[in-house]
Amino acid sequence: MSDAELDESAELDDGNPSEFGQQSRALFNHLPKLSVLGGCCGTDHRHIEAICKAAK
């Protein structure tokens, strides 16, 4: 979605935090020196927790 569409949106799709963690794990495996990960609109503490678990 564009910035304008996001601004007008009544709710954001938060996706699947577990899947997000698995995708983060794949990035860690592919880019071993990766040191910064995060999310965007719709991510919250569940997503960050999934990233942390994937990093272990």
Image (cartoon, helix red, strand yellow):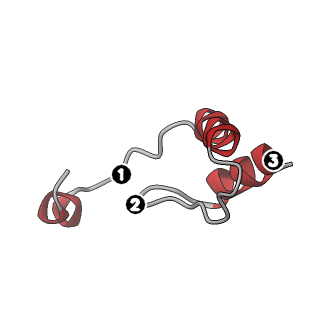
33, 3: nearer the viewer: 33
Q: What is the spatial separation of the Cα atoms under label 3 and label 2, in whole angstroms?
A: 21 Å
Residue indicated by mark 3:
53
Q: Secondary structure at mark 2?
A: loop
Residue indicated by mark 2:
41
| Circle 1/circle 2 CB separation < 8 Å | yes
Indicate the position of residue 2 as horizontal and vertical percent values.
16, 57
Q: Is residue 13 left or right of residue 33?
A: left
Q: Identify the mark nearer the N-term, 1 or 2.
A: 1
Q: Amino acid at mark 2?
A: Cys
The total number of labels drawn is: 3
13, 3: nearer the viewer: 3
Residue indicated by mark 1:
12
Indicate the position of residue 49 as horizontal and vertical percent values.
74, 54
Indicate the position of residue 4 as horizontal and vertical percent values.
12, 65
Residue at (47, 46) in percent of width and height: 14
Q: Is residue 3 left or right of residue 14?
A: left
Q: Identify the mark nearer the N-term, 1 or 3.
A: 1
